[in-house]
Image (cartoon, grey):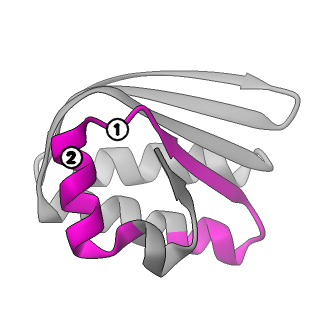
Amino acid sequence: MDFQATETNGQATLYFAGELDMAVGDKVGNLLREYGERNGSVTVDFRDVTFVDSSGIGNLFFTTKDLLALGKRVEIINVREEIMDILHVLGFAEALGITVN
């Protein structure tokens, strides 16, 4: 999985590309934590994420939960329909109370 990040005025945006699976779940979680802890808000752009599995989503879920507990804002954008279906089935957005679109 490839990634790029931008940070401006307390807002981070992480752009991921590839597959979010067991092999890279820890890396994605660590990157989200790193950028989320030093910014007030973080947006995760899934435009080029082509696949997710439960391990990858698990890392994203628990890191997002931790950031929300710190008072951070997290948003996941540009999610492909097939990945959105998986997130809805898992109750990801509902359980965390975040915006996923």
Task: Determine which of the numbered discs, if any, sits on residue 83 in the image.
Answer: 2
Task: Determine which of the numbered discs, if any, sits on residue 4 in the image.
Answer: none
Residue 74, position as x, y percentages in the image? 62, 54
Look at the picture and state if 57 lies above or below 50.
Answer: below
Residue 99, position as x, y percentages in the image? 56, 56
Asked whether disc 1 touches disc 2, contact meaning CB atoms under 8 Å apart, the reply is yes
> 16 and 35: which one is in front?
16
Q: Which residue is rendered at x = 46% and y = 44% of the image?
A: 101
Q: Which residue is mark 1?
A: 79
Q: CA distance from mark 1 to mark 2?
A: 6 Å
Q: Which quarter of the rendering shows the N terminus?
A: top left
The three-letter amino acid code for the residue at tag 2 is Ile
The reply to whether residue 24 is in sight is no
Q: Which quadrant of the structure image shows residue 2? A: top left
- Mark 2, other Cα within 10 Å: few <14 / some 14–19 / many ≥20: some
Check the image and name the residue furthest to the right.
9
Residue 75 is covered by the magenta coloring: yes
In the image, taking residue 29 as reference, residue 43 lies left or right, namely right
Q: Which residues are magenta?
A: 65-92
Q: Which residue is rendered at x = 21% and y = 46% of the image?
A: 83
- Mark 1, other Cα within 10 Å: few <14 / some 14–19 / many ≥20: some
Q: Which residue is rendered at x = 63% and y = 66% of the image?
A: 67
